[in-house]
Amino acid sequence: MKAVFKHEVSLYYHSLLAYVFGAFLLEFIGIGAMLYNINRAVANFEYALGTFCIAFVGLVPVLTMRVMAEEKKQKTDQLLSLLPITSTDIVLGKYFAAAIVFVAPMLVACIYPYIFSMYGDVYLPTSYGALVAFIFLGLALIAIGMFISSLTESQGMAAGIGVVVMLFLYYSSSLADNISSTAFNVVVLLILSAILAIVVKKLTNSDAAGLIVLIVCVAALVITYFAAPSALESLLPDLMKKLSPFERFYTFVNGVFDLTGIVYYISIAVFFLFLCVQSWEKKRYNG
């Protein structure tokens, strides 16, 4: 893992990607700080983070699009598979390298609340609590971006799908408020079940595994429809709100350090890194 980590960090910092990523990230945070903390004299630095966390929609796909896809395109994944390291080591090495590129500029951003506190009243605990949550949110989204990159050989496609997924996660809570039809909810849940079955089939290379997942999901929907039909009306909106990583971040913006939110971000990262490993393993044994 250490060798992969060093190689990936070297690639990031010997190209413009790490510097451009860090510059844009600090620019977005700086604009938010200027609008809220300087122009409006608002003492809450976390508001700047809450407003401009939409920056992740474009920045994360750009950072992660090449991580796995480029290896497949250049066929260097086969060379990595010959090394005396596990697929987990490879995925974690790449993930921690991307995490370094993200965390490095965030360390600079951590100075902002302290500087503002020198010229006014800034409540540092909520500011730094939001910064910690912002970092964990970014790390969770990077894991999602890596998984998307592992599904294709095209960097452009990985970036495009990544932007769409990030946009959906960002606006999922707003979309949930406009969903109230039971029939619509059932159709969307069936589509999501089919997508989940396809992903499982792709990762396991087993038609049976994908079919089992689809049958279980459909059976759960049918049972819910007959046992508690009214529950389906709010099931999809509730899922969209509770599973949205951005929606959970606003709890920190409101001044509450929600430890369950941090655990949730860690769970997202672990889950999608696990899927990355499975995707790499599939490619490794199927050539």
Image (cartoon, grey):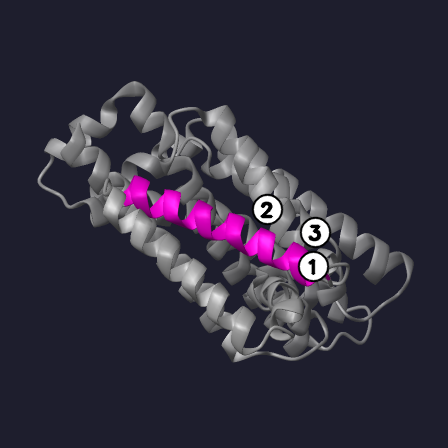
Circles 2 and 3: CB distance less than 8 Å? no
The percent position of residue 255, horizontal first and vertical second, equals 70, 77
Q: Identify the disc placed on residue 49.
A: 1
On the image, numbered disc 2 is attached to which residue?
166
Q: Nearer the viewer, residue 78 or 183?
A: 183
Count up the numbered dots.
Answer: 3
Q: Identify the disc placed on residue 29.
A: 3
| Residue at x 91%, y 62% (from the top left corner) | 40
Report the amino acid beneath label 2.
Met
Above or below: residue 63 compared with residue 139:
above
Q: Quadrant of the C terminus?
A: top left
- Label 1: which secondary element: helix
Report the amino acid beneath label 1.
Leu
Residue 56 shows in this picture: no
The CA distance from mark 1 to mark 3 is: 6 Å
The percent position of residue 234, horizontal first and vertical second, equals 66, 70
Circles 1 and 3: CB distance less than 8 Å? yes
Earlier in the chain: of badge 2 and badge 1, it is 1
| Residue at x 36%, y 37% (from the top left corner) | 150
Circle 3: is it few (<14), some (14-19), or many (20+) Cα within 10 Å?
many
- Label 3: which secondary element: helix
